[in-house]
Amino acid sequence: MSALLEVENLKKDYHYRSGLFRRRTIEAVKPVSFSLDAGETIAFMGENGSGKSTLAKMLAGVVEPTDGIIRVNGEVLEPKDFKTRCKLIRMIFQDPNTALNPRIQIGRILEGPLKRNTNMTPQERERRIMQTLKRVGLLPEHAYFYPQMLATGQKQRVSLARALILQPCIIVADEALNGLDMSMRSQILNLLLELQEEMGLSYIYVSQHMGVIKHFSDKIMVMQDGEVVERGPTEEVFSNPQHPLTQKLLDSHFAAPALDRTTRISRATPKIST
């Protein structure tokens, strides 16, 4: 039985002129392959500029890949087939303040994907909108609010509702919890886990927050300079990191005990003979 999502040699190059007759190519994402099962979460982690967000955007259809194949349920997903992609893979962006049009009511924001991608009647669309708002912890009345009338956490719930409105099987979340305080982050994270259990959703999560990744993901891919340098089950990678970057990211978040830090420093510092 094949995985829900299969990615083969997906890559992204950017070309630009560095002189009158010279062209330069930057490999933003080098060929990467992986699979994701239904109800599973994979996290991409790495430093800024590692290519993790570009990879996530290629999967969501925001960025067109230079090469590679994406399959969902065994069917190849064509880069220009936005109608099919929208029903299968949806994205939650990092900043809900810029992702939502402040001049459009929440209900109309949620109705847009339904109008473009389904043959639902107005009554069916209204019913789906109300159900989805309740599912993400908002009230049906919020359909008549404008985004600027909501708190940041509520706006991110609207972004989640927009991702869910077409009932996709995969949601891509690019640093989606970054702008939230700790309490709101925990609430949204628990909501995502509830929705995953209830709907069998699969998540592709991009983050530098090790605590969230540890709690939320089933497996990890660590990226550096557009390349995957380490991968594996979350528990395994966290307990026994193999690549120096993974170790660095973990150390920066989970502060090592003082004795362990001293030991590491003494090992790294050469003795000076007198």
Image: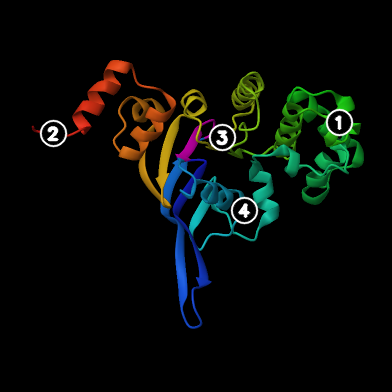
What's the magenta region?
Answer: 38-45
Mark 1: few, some, or many residues within 10 Å (few <14, many ≥20)?
Answer: few
Please report whichever mark, 4 or 1, sits nearer to the chain's N-terminal start. Answer: 4
Work out whether mark 3 precedes mark 4 in sequence or the reverse, and give the earlier one.
4
The C terminus: image quadrant:
top left
Reading the image, the residue beneath label 3 is 202
| Three-letter code for the amino acid on which mark 3 is drawn | Ser
Which is nearer the N-term, disc 3 or disc 2? 3
Residue beneath disc 2: 272
Q: Which numbered disc, 4 or 2, marks the residue that appears first in the sequence?
A: 4
Q: Which residue is mark 1?
A: 149
Residue 196 lies in quadrant: top right
Residue named by callout 4: 61
The correct choice, above or below, for 163 with respect to 26 in the image is above
At x 54%, y 51%, the residue is 54
Question: Closer to the observer: label 4 or label 1?
Answer: 1
Mark 4 closeness class: few <14, some 14–19, many ≥20 residues within 10 Å: many
**SS at circle 2:** loop
Relative placement, left or right, of 117 versus 245 is right
